Image (cartoon, rainbow, N blue to C red):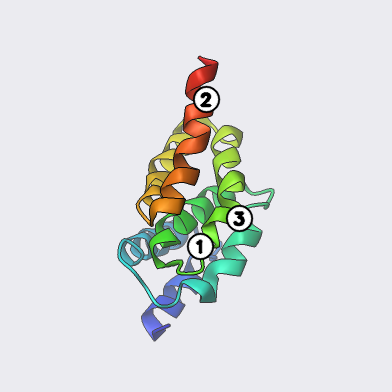
Amino acid sequence: MDAETKMLVQLADEEDWETRNKAFLLLIEAVNRKVDWAYEVWDKLVDDLSSSNMELRLRAGQLLSYLAISDSEQRILEIFPEIWDITYDLDYESSLDLFQSTWKIGLAGAEQKKYYFKPMKKDFKKR
């Protein structure tokens, strides 16, 4: 991981909302393409999925969704149900932000696509 990305990861945990938000948006830009440092931040993001802090859960879910294209080990398949469940935990606007990020998981490969559409089909049948 280069120095700039390390700095962004650190700034994304700052207490100041504006600093944290700018760092997060720059990280989202960075992970919009395949990166070689996905597993350097993976475990922390997975831990953040179970945080009591709603914003932390949301951001972790979004970053992990974007990192799916860099996930050669397909770890996303193990945590996808947890990410999907978070879309139900959050307020409507936040839930929508995370839901809109999850489509990146479906683009990561055939297996990921299958996992991505499974809960959608289940929800659709309920309606």
Work out how far the residue at label 1 is from the one at label 2, CA to CA, in angstroms. 24 Å
Is residue 52 among what the camera can see?
Answer: yes
Residue at point 62%, 58% (across, down): 48
Residue 105 appears in the picture as rendered: no
> Label 3 near label 1: C-beta < 8 Å?
no
Could you classify mark 1 by the number of other residues whose Cα lies within 10 Å: few (under 14), some (14-19), or many (20 or more)? some
Expressed as whole percent of the image width and height from the top left, the position of residue 19 reads 43, 63
**Identity, as a three-letter code, of the amino acid under mark 3:** Glu
Give residue 123's mark.
2
Residue 34 to residue 51: above or below: below
Left or right of residue 31: residue 99:
right
Report the side of 76 relative to 30 (left or right): right
Q: Which residue is mark 1?
A: 74
Q: Position of residue 80 (x, y in %)?
A: 55, 49
SS of the residue under disc 3: helix
Q: Which residue is mark 3?
A: 78
- Element assignment for label 1: loop
Q: Residue at x 45, y 38 (%)?
A: 117
> What is the x, y in percent for residue 18?
42, 57
> In the rendered view, does 100 fall on the left or right side of 53?
left
Q: Residues within 10 Å of mark 2 (few under 14, many from 20)?
A: few
At label 1, the amino acid type is Gln
Report, in whole angstroms, how far the alpha carbon at label 2 lies from the one at label 3: 20 Å
The answer to which of 120 and 17 lies nearer the viewer is 120
